Amino acid sequence: MSPLLEYSDQFRAPIWMVAVRLAVVLAIAWVVGPMLSRTRWGTAILSSKKENPRSLIGIVAVLAWFVLFSVGMLRHLTFHSKAWDLAIFDQVIWNLANGNGWQCSVRGVQDLRGDHFEPILLIFVPIYRLMPHVGWLLGAQAAALVGAGVILWTTYRRKIGDAAAFMLFLAYLFFPPIHWLSIADFHPIALAPLFVMIAWWGRERGKVAAFIAGLVGLGLCGEEGFIVAGWWGFWEFLVSGISRATRRPAIGWTGLAAMVLFWAGFVYLSAVYIPAHRVEGAGYFYVHRYAYLGHNLSDIVRNFFTRPDLWIGHLADSRSMALLALYLVPLALLPLLRPKVLALLIPTAIYTLLSQSPEQKSIFHQYTAMWIPFLMIAASEALGKLGADRLLVDQRSQDQMGTGIRSLPPDHDLHSPDQPPGRQGSAPVPFFSVFPILIASFLAFLAFSPIFGLSIHPELFQPEPWAGEAKGIVASIGPDQAVSAPSALCPHLSHRRVLLLKPDNKWPGTGEILMLPDFPPPAN
């Protein structure tokens, strides 16, 4: 079976057509985009000093939240949500709210802390005590994704101009991985983009408390957040702590402390905490995705550094290349212009691209969550850099013409992330690059989004033929009945202590377990 078959199925096109779509998106973005920027209309928009009213940003954000929440809820209500992972998180939060601890029978574990470290789930416990419903999870996930975009706009409106920042916000909302994440059930890691943006905002504004809060929130979303937060701390120390070109020493030294604490935390979680809570078996379960490197975490790390021949092929296989293209082309390749910022993705790229799990190397699952914010940050920084370069050229031309305007130094980067807060340019900068990213993201939305356009999946939002029968069965089951159910029914039965995923039919301390019929029904 071709490793790219999933892409062909999800995008409803042969692989060669997917490649053509990507090429067309990129070509149109970089042909039409610069042309638009040279029109009177385009110049007027990017040169305008008029700020977009906050009400407009709010309206767009609310509409975006409504769309993302609606597609997630509609998928659930039509019996397309699954046991993995909506029922898993819905049940464990319900159990926490009802005094049953972290037990998660649908996942087959006595304690979900032995599977992942995700204490962010505790924020839902109070509301589940009052009104338990998966809608809270899907709504919070949609709010986190849209909220990350709002913070992106807030962060860059001073650096690239209000109009350009608003267009960047629209490009973020059109980015196809966000839409696929919204219909992939609920996952705590999907809340991570919000915390990444909070940390970046704090970093850009020199707000150490916000920077720390963002990193802590990132870690609360999952143990992989500790890896990323530690690497970010190391990166920040190099960029802001010891660089002579920066005036962010507080952020830099905070980054050094974050590196030590978060990486030590990950070692503790993966080697001690998570295995200690895994009643079903010792060890960190997810090392099996890297079994070709070793059978435990220490072997994997050692072989990563000493045996690159074991993993180098995974970085350049067809699935990895397809994934990178689907991340970069909708952003008009702009992140590649800021490799220093893109370096923040190194740990995410390593544990994603080296994995043997095909789900990790696709945009159709929750693993996109850590890529999304850093790609958008790199693209935003590229816009600022190109804008500063354009301004520098214009000012040098004016200086040479004898206008008396002082030229900027040759090495000056008006919008560099290394510039101290308050030193960035505050006037809108006309440049051509914001149009390509907006065009590319919109065309990619039409070509690759599951909620609209060529890759739409209307069947995910339409009731299954057996939905009526399934609803009747769900309604007939008492709240205390132990149940073994097919995946499609599990998210509708998860508010009970014992819910098993068929064909499992045993749970410690439980007597009779009701076995439900299969849905969808087996073919005759």
Image (cartoon, helix red, strand yellow):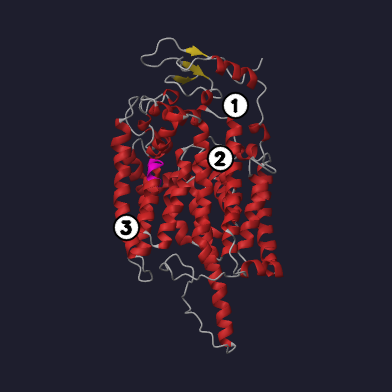
Out of 437 and 496, give the one closest to the viewer: 496
Q: Which residue is mark 2?
A: 182
Task: Examine the residues drawn in magenta and state their main secondary structure.
Answer: helix
Which region is colored magenta?
A: 218-223
Judge the density around disc 1: few (<14), some (14-19), many (≥20) Cα neighbours within 10 Å: many
Q: Are marks 1 and 3 in contact (CB under 8 Å)?
A: no
Q: Is residue 196 above or below residue 396?
A: above
In the displayed structure image, the side of residue 273 where residue 444 appears, left or right = right
| C-alpha gap between disc 1 and disc 2 | 16 Å
Q: Which residue is mark 1?
A: 79
Circle nearer the N terminus (1, 3): 1
Q: Which residue is mark 3?
A: 254
Q: Are marks 1 and 2 in contact (CB under 8 Å)?
A: no
Quadrant of the snapshot with the C terminus? top right
Q: Are marks 2 and 3 in contact (CB under 8 Å)?
A: no
Is residue 244 located in the magenta-colored stretch of the structure?
no
Q: Position of residue 322 (x, y in %)?
A: 57, 47
